[in-house]
Amino acid sequence: MKTRLLAAAVAAVALVGGCSAPKSVPYKSVLGDFKAVVPWGWSVTTDSVGNSFAQVDFIGPFDGDFFLGAPSLSVRWYKRYGTHRLRGGSLEMYTDAADFFEQTLKNVYGERESIVYGPGQREDGGREVVKRPEDLKLKGSGLAAKYFIILSPEKAPESNLWGVEKDRQGHAINMRMHAYALVEVEGGFYVLCYPATRRGFDKYEDSFRTLLGSFRPLTAGPGGPKVRLAAPTP
């Protein structure tokens, strides 16, 4: 199942009387499994495979500091032990959020080539290097999320003009700086991702943190059981 919508239309926000556009709007997944606050006006694509896998991508306007010129945010759902076929034909399967971190670092980025950062920053403005994801409490749901950022280079096509840097040999590389938050619920986990570049990361980091802070799972994946959340503390 695939759909394409506009975030502004989904959120039912209209511009009237010359009002300026809002920075972000409430969004509820067309699959009915989560709600969050997302950037206003970004296009939305949805893909799902039953209850085993689902992905919602929020794609922003052209920005030359992002790979292929496309800043984006995404929310994915993985059912525990559920299989999902990737574009190249291989299958992915995870037992839990910790397994996702281990496999992603090893198979997607490469442990030797990557640096893992936590959510905090040092006094000098740099980022804290960590070995494991760090726990955050989500404001919108009270659930725990495992947060990490991976900085890792990847060869880029020489014909690509956007979002690339040059290595010491002058070859084009995509210096990936991807932020993740893993939210476990009964039967599986959600993956919130901001796949930026080192050059563009600061531009929409606040949008990712807004998505993360407002994220509220309604069900454990599309068509799954309702997620029971603790009552908010007064």
Image (cartoon, rainbow, N blue to C red):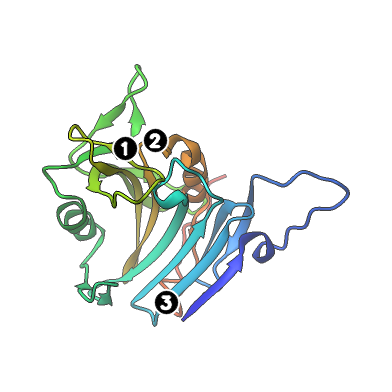
Q: Residues within 10 Å of mark 1 (few under 14, many from 20)?
A: many
In the rendered image, which residue does mark 3 sit on?
Answer: 48
Instruction: Inspect the image, locate mark 2, and give the three-letter code of the amino acid beneath it.
Output: Arg
Distance in Å between CA atoms under marks 1 and 2: 9 Å
Farthest residue, direction front: 159
Q: Residue furthest left?
A: 112
Q: Which mark is residue 165?
A: 1
Q: Nearer the viewer, mark 2 or mark 3?
A: 2
Query: Which of 21 and 184 lies nearest the eye of the viewer?
Result: 21
Label 1 or label 2, whichever comes before in sequence order? 1
Whether residue 50 is visible, yes or no, is yes
User: Is 113 on the left-hand or right-hand side of 200?
Assistant: left
Depth check: 111 or 232 in front?
111
Which is nearer the N-term, disc 2 or disc 3? 3
Q: How far apart are labels 2 and 3 at the CA level?
A: 31 Å
Dot 3: within a 10 Å radius of its alpha carbon, few (fewer than 14), some, or many (20 or more) residues? some
At which x and y percent is residue 226? 46, 73
Which residue is more in the foreground, 163 or 10? 163
| Residue 44 image position (x, y, % from top left) | 54, 64
Residues packed near mark 2 inside 10 Å, few (<14), some (14 to 19) or many (20 plus): some
Secondary structure at badge 3 equals: strand
